[in-house]
Amino acid sequence: MKQVVQNYKSGELALLDVPVPGCKPGGVLVRTAYSLISTGTELMKVSEAGMSMLGKARSRPDQVAKVVQSVATNGVPATYRKVMGKLDSYTPLGYSLCGVVEQVGDGIDDVKAGDLVACAGNEHALHAELNWVPKNLYTPVPDSLAPRHAAFGTVGSIALQGVRQGESRLGEVALVVGLGLIGQLVAQLLTASGVRVVGADPDPARCELAERLGAVACGDPASPAVESAVAELTDGHGVDQVYLAAGGGSNQPVELAARLCRDRGRVVDIGKCRLDLPWNAYYEKELDVRFSRSYGPGRYDPEYEIEGRDYPIGYVRWTERRNLACFLDLVARGRVDVEPLITRTADFDDAVETYQRLKDGELKAVAVLFRYPEQVAEDGPSADAPVVSVPVVPGGARSSAPVRAAKTPVRLAFVGAGNYATSMLLPHLARRDGVELSTVVTTTALSAANAQRKFGFREATTDLDAVLGDASVDAVFVVTRHSSHAELTRKALLAGKAVFVEKPLALTSQELTGVLDAVEESGNDRLQVGFNRRFAPLLQEAGKRFGARTGPASLRYLVNAGRLDHGSWYLQQDTEGSRFAGEGGHFVDTASWLLGADPVSVYALAPSGNEDLQVVLGYPDGSTATISYVTTGAAGFPKETLDLVADGKVLQLDDFVRSSVYDGRKRWVSSRLPKARDKGQAGELAAFVRAVRSGGPMPVPLRSLVATTAATLAVRAALAGGAPVTLAEAR
């Protein structure tokens, strides 16, 4: 296997072929997927290795003291041979990674081969293709967390331990000095804890990044900006805590801490910086100076780290391992965002070049990841070229229902009666012949009563089970919040109802699989998702005029989504999913309908600091669709514009008020301007009601609904992995 090593005497860096470590009892053998370069600690070590012997001695006075002691004990010749032998040896680099368990040692029962784990330790989580990691230095990765983000586990634990040492409290103000990797994480952790953060760093880009990620204000420590921000936030009293996350030989950080800290404030040293404390300043304020020892309790204790003897939680709440698991949980739940910190993801084969560029200053980075050739075991998750399974549509489900008797109304029940249901769906259905609005179900009695009064429902209730058990109800509309769609759809299918569910069908692959399990169990595939745009008259007209194509097409779809109002439930991403997960299926479905196929690959990019997305879909014939989903555009610009180019023709859609086709004969064909935008809701509802009445197929095949949902969900995996995702039907 390959491993990054350094000769401390010569400074040489190499990607060395070394034997695979054995899997000893009390630990696991892990195949690395991503490892993180600590741009602070590791670069300091790399820089020291390039110094002269005198420079090395000056930078490590602690080691010089050991040499002096050895001379006194063993004499000069023996000490010289010992020191030179140690210097002229390869030493490892790295201490933070994520990988897949390849082999489990005796005594390990909390993970198994194929599990994804985050690993810590400068002797066990190295930049190497395989590492043996003892029990207390790894922890399982949450299912929702991408491997490249889990690789931050160790440095995140260092930042977390520093915050714990500061004993921050809700509403306090903290100063973070040094906004490198650790400082950025400290700032985010403090913000997540309800602490207002001021940052100090001479690099304007790092200051801007910290502010985007939640810091109140940041600036150069030598400028008055930091001091002014502290004075304004604290009414001139000074910050409650200072976190020293800077390195180097300057004494400026500890002097700044003394000047800006309040009386009896806390100063926590996390980085390796000069600590010549100005006695008067620290004495007069009675400042509490604390040190944060790496990842937490257990560090440097061989009985804990190597032998696996845990500390009782009643006596030591947060150990190394528990800190590691806690940080991963915070990232998985979106409380800490590490993606904007990633400056570069480099292939592991380019490790030496990457270190050299960092050392020379050519590559200025907050965080750099190494991506490994084999990131997972055969059936494990992949972060480089991942494959997302598209659930198989069950065979044997019925594609038609019994034909209804003539003049018998189609009886519909609504679950949910919010703004979209009452403005875009119910007005069309309420005035449609042959439709009876049977029952409306809501969680609050008043909203059900309002819908009944306004649209003429026969009954209003809060009892969903009663509606699903009502044999007279033909179809159920699910128009609730996103997080409930999959479960309500599943229940309605099992009850034998035709189902119209507003987008999205599901927010996770597990939810999507659950819906299809219900189809298989019940034999009922009578399902339609509210992908209405393919039913828009202007788009259908343009599609007919464009005609069939013979070659691959290029489609561009700009969605000027705009910003949401503060307090919108769409912003509750922990429960309701991201905005794109919620409404992106509209645009994926429209592209797939125009291109006549389901996507086979997904690639996505997202700028830091907002919800803008660039999503590229690949199709079997080589066609591509680019969806630009932006929230930062001008409010007055049209919301949706689309261009389709193929075979010397261009189709254009302008926000559902005008569509045009330009063909090889230089001829425009443009529809008339409608009185109002028609995005297809009326046409979609008419098609659904006809299918329910006649027993014919649903308006959109179930296979297409599943493929669109899977592609929308795959955007998250593509963002996390930084590479295209292949969509493959599960086997």
Image (cartoon, rainbow, N blue to C red):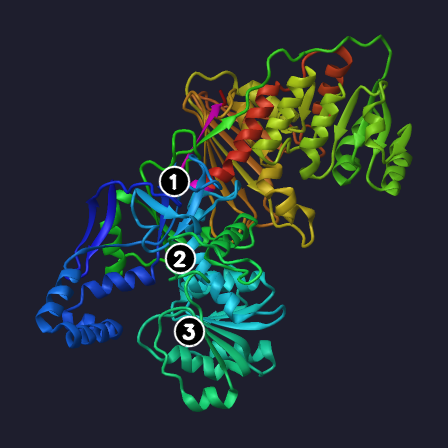
Q: Residue furthest left?
A: 77
Using a 10 Å C-alpha cutoff, classify the residue at mark 3 as few (fewer than 14 neighbours), some (14 to 19) or many (20 or more): some
Q: Describe residue 527's horizontal placement relative to residue 34 as left or right.
A: right
Q: Is residue 584 above or below residue 338?
A: above
Numbered disc 1: secondary structure: loop
Q: Which mark is residue 220?
A: 3
Query: Which residue has dot 2 on it?
Result: 303
Q: Earlier in the sequence, mark 3 or mark 1?
A: 1
Q: Residue at x 38, y 35 (%)?
A: 376
Residue 17 occupies quadrant: top left
Q: Of discs 3 and 1, which sits in the foreground?
A: 1
Q: Is residue 539 above or below residue 227?
A: above
Does the residue at mark 3 contact the one at mark 1 (Cβ under 8 Å)?
no
Looking at numbered disc 3 in the image, what kind of residue is underneath it?
Asp
Q: Describe residue 53's horizontal placement relative to residue 267 as left or right.
A: left
Q: Describe residue 730's horizontal placement relative to residue 76 as left or right.
A: right
Q: Nearer the viewer, residue 632 or 549?
A: 632
In whole angstroms, how far apart are the C-alphas of marks 1 and 2?
18 Å
* Viewport quadrant of the N terminus: top left
Find residue 627 and report its horizontal and vertical position in percent.
Answer: 51, 36
Numbered disc 2: secondary structure: helix
In whole angstroms, how far apart are the C-alphas of marks 3 and 1?
50 Å
Does the residue at mark 1 contact the one at mark 2 (Cβ under 8 Å)?
no
Looking at numbered disc 2 in the image, what kind of residue is underneath it?
Glu
Looking at numbered disc 1 in the image, what kind of residue is underneath it?
Gly
Q: Residue at x 83, y 33 (%)?
A: 441
Query: Which residue has dot 1 on it?
Result: 105
Q: Answer whether residue 96 is magenta in the image.
A: no
- Span colored in magenta: 720-729
